[in-house]
Image (tube, grey):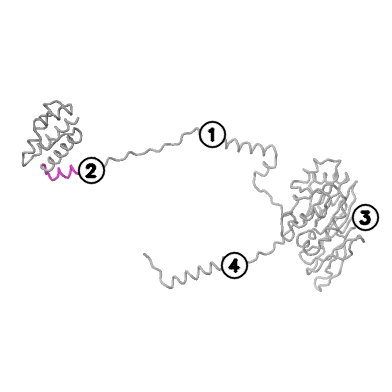
C-alpha cells in the first residue's frame, strides 16, 4: 500500500480547494446580459418581444391575436380575401423573397394593413414604395429621442440611451407617404474635432398602397423588452393605435433573428406534409414489425452444463490412494462393511451372524440364484476369517459383489 506524506496531502487539498472555488464562482456569478437582437415572442432578453407579445391582448382587447410560425407566403396565399386583418412584423431586418413580396402587395392592396418595425426593409419593398433608410455615424452613444407627430398624443419625446440605432428614412414617396414620427440624434460633423450637430429625421411613416396601408418604423429596438420596461411603453401603444380596427391581428414569429432553425437534413422532409406522413408511417411500421418479429422468434436457450458427479471423483481419488499404499486388508474390510450395509438397507436383513440361512434369505429377497448368492456369502465368511488379504482376494470380492448387484 502506498502512503502519501503530509506535504502531498496539503498540495492535493489546496488544488481541490482552488478547483472547488472556481466551480462555485462560475455557478454563482451573474450571467452577462445578452444584447443580441431576437424579437421573438418567447425571448426575455433585452431585445426580445416577450413583454410586447403578452401585452397585445391589452392593446387590442377586441381583436383575435394569432401567432404565425410559418412563412408569410404560406399564410397569405391561403387567406380569405373577403376578411381584413392587420399583420405585425418586428425584427432588426426584414426582407421578402419574390413570392412573399407579391403576396404582401396583394394583401395590402385588398385593404389590409402591415405594420413593420425594422432597420431595413429589403430591396423588393423599398423599390416599390420608393423609400430608403440610412444610419448616421456618431462618435459616442448619445441619447436618441423619438416622438410621434400626432397632436392628440403626449408631445413628450421618448429617450433611448443604450443599444439604440439612429436608423431613419432619407427618401420617401411624398405622394403616398405620411410622416407619423421622427427621431432626433447627434451626427458627427468632423471626426477629428468631434463636432456634432442635432438632426431630426422621419423614423415612422405610413405608405398608402391600394386599399390598405404599410406602417413602417425604422427603430425596432423601441419595441423590445428593455425599453418596454423602461417607461417607453406609451410610444409602442401610440404607434399601434394607427392600425385600423380589424377582427384579426397576425403576429409574425417566423421572420425573426432569434428564431431557432433546424439544421438537420430532415428539415425538408418534415416541412413537406406528404413526406412527413410517409416518414411517420415508415417509423410506425418498423416499430410494429420489430414488436411482432420479436414475439415470433424464440429466445436462445442457454446451454446448462450438468453438475459434475463429485462423489465419483472422490471415490476414484480414495481408490487410487488405497491402491498406491496396497493396504488390501483395509480395502476388503471397507467393501465388506459397505456390502453388509447394502444388505441391511435394501433387504432388511440381520448381518450380525452370517451363515447358510443368510445366503438362503438373501437369494430369496434379491431374486438371485441360490448358488451365486451362496458362493458370495461363503467368500465373505472366508475373507472375514483371514488375517491377511492379497490383491487377488480384493479383485475376486469386487467381481462377486458387482455381479450380484447387476
Q: Position of residue 207 (x, y in %)?
A: 89, 52
Name the N-terminal-most of marks 2 and 3. 3
Crowd around label 2: few <14 · some 14–19 · many ≥20 (10 Å): few
Q: Position of residue 141 (x, y in %)?
A: 78, 68
Q: Can you tell which of label 4 and label 3 is closer to the viewer? A: 4
Could you say which is closer to the camera, residue 366 or residue 393? 366
Label 2: state its secondary structure.
Answer: helix
User: Is 40 within the magenta?
Assistant: no
Which residue does the numbered mark 4 point to in the structure image? 25
Q: Quadrant of the C terminus?
A: top left
Crowd around label 1: few <14 · some 14–19 · many ≥20 (10 Å): few
Which residue does the numbered mark 1 point to in the structure image? 292
Query: What number is the disc on residue 174?
Result: 3
Label 3: state its secondary structure.
Answer: loop
Left or right placement of residue 68 versus residue 346 in this view: right
User: Real-space Cα distance between discs 4 and 2?
Assistant: 70 Å
Q: Position of residue 270 (x, y in %)?
A: 67, 42
Name the N-terminal-most of marks 4 and 3. 4
Q: Can you tell which of label 3 and label 1 is closer to the viewer? A: 1
Q: In percent of the image, x 8 and y 35: which residue is there?
A: 381
The magenta region covers: 316-328
Which residue does the numbered mark 2 point to in the structure image? 314
Q: Quadrant of residue 312?
A: top left
Q: In percent of the image, x 80 and y 70: which residue is there?
A: 191
Amino acid at each position: 500500500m502506498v502512503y502519501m506524506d503530509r506535504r502531498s496531502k496539503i498540495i492535493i487539498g489546496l488544488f481541490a480547494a482552488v478547483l472547488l472555488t472556481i466551480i462555485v464562482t462560475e455557478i454563482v456569478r451573474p450571467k452577462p446580459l445578452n444584447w443580441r437582437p431576437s424579437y421573438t415572442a418567447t425571448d426575455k432578453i433585452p431585445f426580445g418581444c416577450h413583454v410586447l407579445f403578452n401585452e397585445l391582448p391589452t392593446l387590442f382587447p377586441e381583436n383575435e391575436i394569432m401567432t404565425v410560425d410559418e412563412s408569410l407566403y404560406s399564410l397569405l396565399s391561403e387567406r380569405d380575401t373577403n376578411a381584413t386583418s392587420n399583420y405585425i412584423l418586428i425584427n432588426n431586418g426584414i426582407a421578402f423573397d419574390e413570392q412573399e413580396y407579391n403576396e404582401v402587395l396583394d394583401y395590402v392592396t385588398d385593404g389590409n394593413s402591415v405594420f413593420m418595425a425594422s432597420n431595413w426593409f429589403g430591396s423588393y419593398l423599398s423599390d416599390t414604395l420608393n423609400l430608403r433608410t440610412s444610419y448616421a455615424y456618431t462618435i459616442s452613444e448619445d441619447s436618441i429621442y423619438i416622438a410621434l407627430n400626432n397632436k392628440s398624443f403626449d408631445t413628450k419625446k421618448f429617450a433611448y440611451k443604450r443599444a439604440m440605432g439612429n436608423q431613419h428614412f432619407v427618401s420617401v414617396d411624398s405622394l403616398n407617404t405620411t410622416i407619423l414620427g421622427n427621431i432626433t440624434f447627434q451626427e458627427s460633423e468632423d471626426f477629428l474635432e468631434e463636432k456634432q450637430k442635432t438632426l431630426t429625421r422621419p423614423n415612422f411613416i405610413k405608405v398608402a398602397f391600394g386599399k390598405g396601408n404599410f406602417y413602417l418604423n425604422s427603430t425596432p429596438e423601441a419595441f423590445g423588452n428593455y425599453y418596454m420596461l423602461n417607461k417607453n411603453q406609451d410610444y409602442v401603444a401610440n404607434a399601434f393605435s394607427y392600425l385600423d380596427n380589424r377582427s384579426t391581428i397576425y403576429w409574425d414569429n417566423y421572420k425573426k433573428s432569434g428564431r431557432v432553425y433546424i439544421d438537420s437534413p430532415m428539415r425538408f422532409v418534415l416541412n413537406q406534409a406528404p413526406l412527413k406522413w410517409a416518414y411517420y408511417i415508415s417509423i410506425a411500421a418498423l416499430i410494429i414489425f420489430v414488436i411482432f418479429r420479436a414475439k415470433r422468434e424464440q429466445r436462445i436457450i442457454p446451454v446448462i452444463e450438468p453438475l459434475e458427479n463429485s462423489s465419483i471423483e472422490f471415490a476414484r481419488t480414495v481408490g487410487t490412494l488405497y491402491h498406491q499404499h496396497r493396504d488390501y486388508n483395509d480395502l476388503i474390510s471397507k467393501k465388506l462393511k459397505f456390502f453388509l450395509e447394502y444388505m441391511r438397507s435394501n433387504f432388511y436383513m440381520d448381518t450380525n451372524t452370517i451363515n447358510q440361512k443368510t445366503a438362503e434369505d438373501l437369494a430369496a429377497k434379491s431374486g438371485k440364484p441360490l448358488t451365486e448368492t451362496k458362493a458370495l456369502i461363503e467368500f465373505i465368511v472366508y475373507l472375514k476369517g483371514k488375517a491377511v488379504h492379497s490383491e487377488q482376494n480384493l479383485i475376486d470380492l469386487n467381481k462377486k459383489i458387482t455381479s450380484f448387484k447387476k
